[in-house]
Amino acid sequence: MRHAGTHQVYTETRIENPKEIIFEFLMNNFRLEKAVSFVDFSRFTGLSHEVLLEASTAAIENALVKINKNSLELTQTGKRFLNDTLLSYMSNAEDRPRLEPG
């Protein structure tokens, strides 16, 4: 609301929370069902791929994503439950959903 009623234009949104950066990047890539290259992740986010792997723990444990040599990729289950997959990156470790095998 800082710019309301003024002639100033708000042209940029800056995300500084690494968890939100990871979420936004994955949302854009996974919605295209595209594997996430570790090189691209680091280049576009400024974060190391180790940060991505650490954030992916719950998704990996629930077989929503898999790690390849140079990328992170959705599994068939991850594609089917894409919203849950993405939300697992926003949750705190203790709040992360655990999918039961069905």
Image: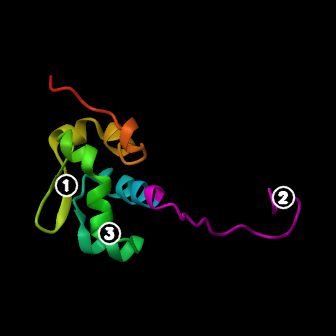
Of badges 1 and 2, nearer the viewer stands 1
- The amino acid type, in three-letter code, at marker 1 is Glu
Q: Quadrant of residue 46?
A: bottom left
Q: Which residue is mark 2?
A: 4
Q: Main secondary structure of the magenta part?
A: loop
Q: Nearer the viewer, mark 3 or mark 2?
A: 3
Residue 54 appears left or right of 24 = left
Identify the residue at image location x=63%, y=69%. 12
Q: What coloring was used for the rendering?
A: rainbow
The magenta region covers 1-20
Looking at the rendered structure, the secondary structure element under dot 3 is helix
Residue 96 is situated, as x and y percent measured from the top left of the image, at: 35, 38
Write down the residue under mark 3: 41
State how far apart marks 1 and 3 are (Cα). 12 Å
The answer to which image quadrant residue 26 occupies is bottom left
**What's the residue type where badge 3 is placed?**
Phe
Task: Give the residue at the far left of this rendering.
Answer: 69
The stretch drawn in magenta includes residue 15: yes
